[in-house]
Each structure stands twice: as C-alpha cells, then as structure tokens.
Image (cartoon, rainbow, N blue to C red):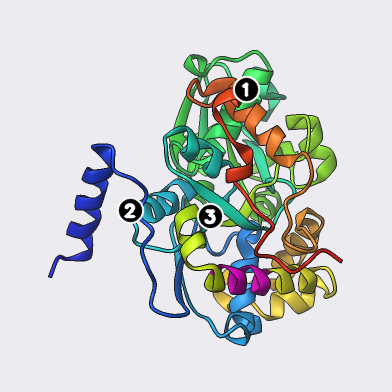
Amino acid sequence: MKTPLLRLSLIAAALALGGTLPAQAADANTVTIMVGGINKIIYLPAKLTEALGYFKDEGLNVELQSQPAGVDAENQLIAGAVQGVVGFYDHTIDLQAKGKEVEAIAVFGKVPGEVEMVSTKAAPTFKSMADAKGKTLGVTGLGSSTDFLTRYLALRQGVESKEYSLLPVGAGNSFIAAIKQDRIQAGMTTEPTVSQLLKTGDAQVLVDMRTEEGTKAALGGLYPAPSLYVSNAWAESHKEQATKLAHAFAKTMQYLHTHSAEEIADKMPRDYYGNDKAMYVAAIKSSLPMFTTDGRMPEGGPETVLKVLSTFKPQVKAKNIDLSKTYTNAYLPAAK
C-alpha cells in the first residue's frame, strides 16, 4: 500500500506531466474538507456548521482538516487527497487558467475579509500601498489569495512587483511575530489577527477589505472570497453529497445573520480565542457584514475577481476563462 505522502507525490508528478484533476470518490456520505486556516474568522462557517450539527443533519460525515495557507489547501484538492476546500473563490479562476476545473458551490463572503496591516514602526513613512517600494510585505503563502491581492493593491498604486519583496509568513501567531520582528513592514491578514495587532498596538490598518465599502474602494467592486469549492467532476458524480454540503452551509449562513456574535463565539472551540473571548467576539461582530445570507454568489462578483487576477497574471485572460464553470448555485436551496 502506498503511503499518503508517496501517493500525493505520484499524483503531483502525474499532474505536472499534464494529467487531469482527479475526482476522488468518497465513501458514501463521507467527505474530507481542507480549510485554509480553520481558526480564521473568514472561514468560521466551516467549524460552525460542524458545531451546529448541520453536516450530521444532512446525513454527512465531514472531516475538517486545516492548512495555514489557501494555496496549500488547493494543492490537496488537486492531488485528490480531499473532496473539498474552504478557501478563496479566486483559486477556481486561477486553476481554470491552468487547465483544472473547480467550482465554488457555496459562497461565504461577499468580500475578502482581508486587511493590509502596516507595522507601527513603519507607519510614519508607509501611508498607502504607493509606499510599498523597497519594503517586505507579508502574505500567507506564495501563490495564495493574499499574494494575488497584495500584488493587485500595489500595482493599482503604481508599484510593480519587482519593487518590493513578498515573504510567506502564514497567519495568526507567525504573522504577528513577523510584524514584531520587523521581518515584514506590512502584510495581509484576517480576523482575529487584525484585532490582536490593533489591541497590542503593533500594527495599524492600511487597507480594509472587511466591508463592502472598503472592498469596492480597494478593488473596484465586490470580491467574493471565502467559499467551499470542489472539482467540477466530483460535484457532477456526487450530486447528492454536493447538495447536502451546500444545504448545510446555507443554513449556517442564515444562522450567522440571525444570532449575535456572542452566541456564535459560544459555539467555537476555546483555543480559537484563548483568554480573550471579548476580543474574539468583537472580531466576529466586525466581520458579520461580510457574510452572504444564503451561500449564493453575489452578482457581479466573479467579474471583479477575474479583472483583478488578469491584471497581473498573464495566463488569466477574460477571453480564456469561462466564469460559469467556476461557481454554481445549483446545489443550494432555491432562492426565496
């Protein structure tokens, strides 16, 4: 029997030689989902759905796994090691440009929920992304959505990628350490890391994409991001499981808009907030407006994402991308 590591290596090698995205069959109603940082509030619906029992209500046995960066979760899906990923929708477009078809079947966020934070030390001379020249900027991983967005924000301010450095620093404590140690002068992260840095005074907000207003100002439109995506082939051959997953997440999105931040925090594991539950509750409260109410793709969102990616990724061009294959509302409950 091949070890999981060897199996992944063999699949990765096959893909490098032009193989196709495998549609690994799960056991009946058993699904493994990789989350690009399970304790990030932007991906809170994953753990919350489990905590609320909605997966079980649908007759599903769902195993949630976590990788600190979305690009690593994406690689697990491509390798066939998991059936789904909770990550950023933009990966579906980027992957289609590489010949891999994946689609979002439930969208959690109308906006990225990401914040470009600048260290307090660098802040006096780093007042906008136009000041990124010569700086080191933190991202969760190279090729991640934070990588995509950072490069776009800089380019929009006239700063080319060769004029600054990107450093993969992960999220949470590793991101905070990079800021404190001045290994990065600014970087992109999410809640609750944003609130932690603001509380300690180690960093300040430079670009805020937690709200629709802030996202439209930064990116020119809504940028649907946190979502559940699967391979198109898997969804087609496992329609029942795909539908059950989408329905479970749709119920969670309704829960988020009908319960308080305190009630939501009470459902989450204690290690998500440690000894500062009040800060965690505040972070959830500030993030709630970003979430969709029903898991559906917001109108116009895919076009904004395509515009952003095509700005700096030569292989991503509108004429070569079929957006209708990057998401679907078909597995969700009928719109009310």
Give the residue at x 85% y 73%: 258
Residue annotated with mark 1: 154
Report if residue 244 lies within the magenta region. Answer: yes
Please indicate whether residue 331 sits to the left or right of residue 92 in the image: right
Q: Amino acid at mark 3?
A: Gly
Query: Where residue 155 sits: x, y (%)?
Result: 62, 19
Depth check: give the residue in front, 252 or 31. 31
Crowdedness near tag 1: few (<14), some (14–19) or many (≥20) residues, C-alpha within 10 Å: many
Query: Is the C-beta separation of discs 2 and 3 under 8 Å?
Result: no
Please tell me the numbered disc located at residue 172: 3
Q: Which residues are magenta?
A: 242-249
Please tell me the numbered disc located at residue 79: 2
- In this view, the residue farthest toward the front is 237
Q: CA distance from mark 2 to mark 3?
A: 26 Å
Q: CA distance from mark 3 to mark 1?
A: 23 Å
Quarter in which the C terminus is drawn: bottom right
Magenta segment's dominant SS is helix
Dot 2 or dot 1: first in sequence order is 2
Query: Where residue 319 sits: x, y (%)?
Result: 59, 23
Give the residue at x 44% y 41%: 141
Q: Amino acid at mark 1?
A: Ala
Q: Residue 5, relative to residue 140: is it above or below?
A: below
Q: Residue 144, relative to residue 264: is it above or below?
A: above
Q: Residue 43, relative to residue 160: is it above or below?
A: below
Query: Where residue 255 sits: x, y (%)?
Result: 78, 74
Query: Where residue 179 sits: x, y (%)?
Result: 54, 41
Report if residue 328 lies within the magenta region. Answer: no
Is residue 325 visible in the rendered image? The answer is yes
Please indicate whether residue 171 sits to the left or right of residue 260 in the image: left
